[in-house]
Amino acid sequence: MDAARDATRARASTGDEGETSATSNARARAKATTVSVWRALDAAPERAFAWTEKKVLTWEAPKFIWRTAATSLLFGSVLFRMLRRPRKINWEQTLQQIARIGPQTLGVSLLTSSFVGMVFTIQFCKEFAKVGLKNAIGGLLGLAFARELTPVICAIILAGRIGSAIAAELGTMQVTEQVDQLTVLGTDPVDYLVIPRVIACAISLPVLCIISFAQALAASIVLADFRYGVSPNVIIDSAAKYLEPSDLGIMTAKAVAFGAVIAVISCGWGTTTTGGAKGVGESTTASVVISLTAIFIVDFVLSLIFFQK
């Protein structure tokens, strides 16, 4: 009996010691976990700062952002040099660019203006004949052509025909290091490549607009006479009544602004080209798209300025 009691007591004491040991181990693990958590929380700010610092130091701006910034700086540089150093303008290059831009753009501008003029003539003659206002057709056509249609259409043609060529040409020169060679030879690329093209576009586009305006109005007169029986004298007298010299001045001002913007964007994206032939293609496409967007933005701003009253 005594031996059985002693065995039972021994087993009980062993169980108590096992439970005590298990409890102690659980407490130790919990304490270790708590310490690890607090250490991780203490180190978290340092790790976050290190991660942020690494990302900031290694971050590279998207190509579109830095190329847009470079083009903006180029525009400021061109404007500054033209105003402060007009004697350094390379007029020989400028005249060559004017001789290149005019013939390459004139035919497309005349053809486009003719069909745009005839389309609007169809719409105006059809609708105004219903209310007996045929005498006002010429004036409305003249205002539409002079204030909006002619400068915008010619600017779009210039961006697609000349702006793309400028971007491709300068992009090819950039990736083949010809621009760097000009710098080594002591020639400023901005003075030699950019400013002549900006001046040429700013001069050529107003001339194209004036010729295209006359062509659009002439096409409208011919179609109105042969298709709708509206006398050419009626169109001409109405246009002379409604149009003012300021309207032609607004058309010229818009054309100058559009030409300068197209040339600067094309030159900016061309001179920042990287990546070989693929980069040249991307720069050419991007320059045209951005130029078209800029044309409508500038048109909106100028319209607010000229027609706010």
Image (cartoon, rainbow, N blue to C red):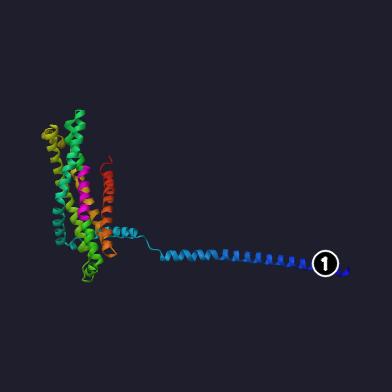
Disc 1 on helix, strand or loop?
A: helix
Is 75 in front, or is 111?
Answer: 111
Looking at this rendering, what residue extends furthest in the bottom direction?
184
Left or right? Give the position of 208 relative to 177.
left
Q: Can residue 179 be seen in this view?
A: yes
Residue drawn at the location 79% of the way across and 67% of the way down: 11
How packed is label 1: few (under 14 Cα within 10 Å), some, or many (20 or more)?
A: few
Q: Is residue 86 magenta?
A: no
Left or right? Give the position of 303 relative to 24.
left
Report the amino acid beneath label 1: Thr
Image quadrant occupied by the C terminus:
top left
**Image position, residue 146 (x, y; %):** 19, 42
Is 139 in front, or is 250?
Answer: 139
Image quadrant occupied by the N terminus:
bottom right
Residue drawn at the location 15% of the way across and 46% of the way down: 111
Residue drawn at the location 60% of the way across and 66% of the way down: 36
Q: Is residue 153 magenta?
A: yes
**Image position, residue 80 (x, y; %):** 25, 59
Q: What stretch is highlighted in magenta?
A: 147-163
Residue marked by disc 1: 8
Q: In this view, does 153 lie above or below 9?
A: above
**Image position, residue 94 (x, y; %):** 16, 59
Q: Main secondary structure of the magenta part?
A: helix
